[in-house]
Image (tube, rainbow, N blue to C red):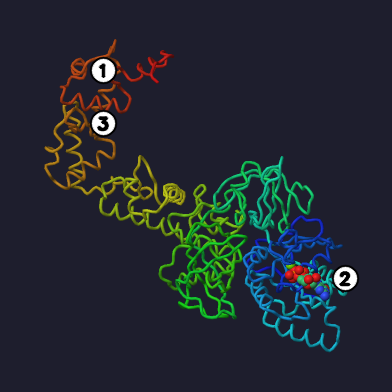
Amino acid sequence: MQSQCVPVGARAMSSNLNNIPGKHITVGVAGHVDHGKTALVRALTGTETDRLKEEQARGMSIALGFAHLALPGGVVDLIDVPGHEKFVRTMIAGATGLDAALLVVAANERVRPQTVEHVALLGLLGVRCGLVVLGKSDLVMEPEERARVEAEVRTFLLPTFLRGADIVWASALMGEGLARVADALAGLLAASAPRPEWPYFTLPVDRAFTITGQGTIVTGTLRRASLRVGQMVEIWPRGLRAEVRGLEVHGRAVPIAQPGWRTAVNLRGVKKEDVAHGDTLATVGALRPTRLLDAELTVLESAVRPVKRGQAVTLHWGTAEVAARVYPLGPVEIAPGVSSPTQFRLAEDAVVPVGEAFVIRAPSPPETLGGGHIVDSYPAKHTRVYEDVLRSFHVLAHGTATDRLRVKLREAGPAGRDRRELTLDLGLDAGALTPDVAHFCGGLALDSEVFTTLAAQARDGVRAFHAKNPLRRGLPREELRRLLPRSLAPVAFASLLEAAARAGTLETTAGLVRESGYNPEEALSPIEREIAGEVEARFRDGGLKPPDLGDVLKRDRRRKNVYHFLSEAGRLTPAVGGAEGRTVVFHAEAIAAATQRLQSASWGDGLSVSELDAILGTTRKFAIPLLEHLDALGITRRRGDRRVWGEAEIKDEKERPNDDTP
Ligand code: GDP
Ligand code: MG
């Protein structure tokens, strides 16, 4: 008996058992056309899977057939795939999400082309265990002949995933071995590993139809996670939404379907034309379209020639397919039998979840070239392959959840990633993203090291600013922002400043960022201190008729620096006003005195500028910039060409309940 086997690409996040009464596996019945697959399924389950008229007339399977076998240990779903070469695409659609294979080889015909192709495809699609039936055993009765056939089949299986599989002789016609086939299936069921848990479900649609009175129904194998009645789902690639109105498993209505089950989903909110074979149903918000895929690609041993850089292929996954070009991330050619990290560039948008198994085929002449599984559904475009691209690929393919998160966070750099999207992209639970991996700014996650580097950069920027402008209180926030990478998100910048404040390195007041405790006062040299005293005195003495700033500064660099220092310290205030936008600088005490005088004035219906000039004891030239400054602070307010006291105006507005402004 085989040990537990987990399909490749189905990486476990945790090993919690899914809540299914009994176990369940889906087994693909594969093999060359006419080797007796459909007859075997019928003999085992009583289900006729060749339901189509054409199938019955031609005696050949065309569509996928579904049957199931209830065993003491649980349920085995059997998917009867067509064996004819022409239906390989259908075969691939049927083989998606399989847990195991049941290979049928007619004993009288032995290994034929589609026997080889099917085993290769199943291997590429990540199936790792199964069972082999030497069918039509009634046609080969001689023990010696049987031994020869069996030896031949074993040799064929040796390099495949079925090398250790049980081989059972059976006849659908005569009944020989059928019980043993069922036993072997029960063995596979018992040996099956618990399914890995995913944070979202997918359901590749194999059929869509309508039933009168019920609406739109789609069928497929439910993958990755469970699906409930009432749940909203997204339908890709169109991105439509619908509600699950009902679920049916094995012909019975169920409130919840578990991953692995063949499921019929009754959808509310979409027409039959809106959903078709090849679409994917998924949890809302879990997936999005992509044009690039990074994948581990294995070229079949049997391929005629290597797969080359830029080669056009058809990529098949789930029940869908898309035209793509191959860009190996290693050498430009991938030889038969070789695996290579590869980027696919898709001809159109497609929704292909991470971990998904795929097959590539040459469009013409049709030939299966290889396959593998998706390592990154949303990679950057690798125009040239550097060492670090391959290193990241390797981590994404084989690394721990933490390492994979780090790769994507580093890739995002200062822009960071949406937390939910990041974990979903990697098929991880939100809990996998912990504070030791990332710095969180609301819904955004930044790589911890990137964040630390940015914090250091900000600190250095502020330090350099202080060194260059010792008399300035700090660096305007927006100037600091410009010193950091453009891609840095605003929330991340805010978070950076908060973290620096918490750490006691930087502080921000009134839009200025400085090193904590930085005091420009201490940076004043004796000469500067003297200049400061003189400049301040001139403005203080000037009152509401202050001197002209240019006259005071005398185009002197040092005097200018001192002036900045005084204005940032709040001792001098530049007021801009009038039609020419003149700047008049007032001392803080002059403004305070003016405010007091205005407060005690009798405002009546408001005062004109010349009335205010008189109250303030100044002239229009100074009064206008001052009043506009006070307007901006809300101390006074303009009403037409008069002014009112700011607070009076506020009260006034409250008293007018029915303001007729729109
Ligand atoms: P499939 O194409 O692999 O699904 O093959 P089918 O199940 O349609 O069978 C192909 C043909 O083989 C049919 O004519 C069957 O009657 C015949 N066949 C199937 N099973 C047996 C068997 O166990 N013994 C014999 N002698 N013929 C069989
Ligand atoms: Mg058939």
Crowding at mark 1 (Cα within 10 Å: few <14, some 14-19, many 20+): few
Q: Amino acid at mark 3?
A: Ala
Residue of label 1: 640
Q: Earlier in the sequence, mark 2 or mark 1?
A: 2
- Cβ–Cβ under 8 Å for marks 2 and 1: no
SS for tag 2?
Answer: helix
Measuring 28% from the left and 20% from the top, which residue is drawn there? 638
Q: Is residue 634 left or right of residue 314?
A: left
Q: CA distance from mark 2 to mark 1?
A: 100 Å
Q: Earlier in the sequence, mark 3 or mark 1?
A: 3
Task: Name the disc covering residue 599, or none.
Answer: none
Quadrant of the rendered structure where residue 396 is? bottom right
SS for tag 3?
Answer: helix
- Outermost residue toward the top? 604
Task: Name the disc covering residue 179, or none.
Answer: 2
- Outermost residue toward the front? 57
Residue 342, image x, y percentages: 50, 71
- Cβ–Cβ under 8 Å for marks 2 and 3: no
Residue of label 3: 588
Residue 259, image x, y percentages: 71, 57
Residue 601, image x, y percentages: 27, 14
- Outermost residue toward the bottom? 144
Crowding at mark 3 (Cα within 10 Å: few <14, some 14-19, many 20+): some
Q: Amino acid at mark 1?
A: Gly
Residue 37 seen in the figure: no
- Cβ–Cβ under 8 Å for marks 3 and 1: no
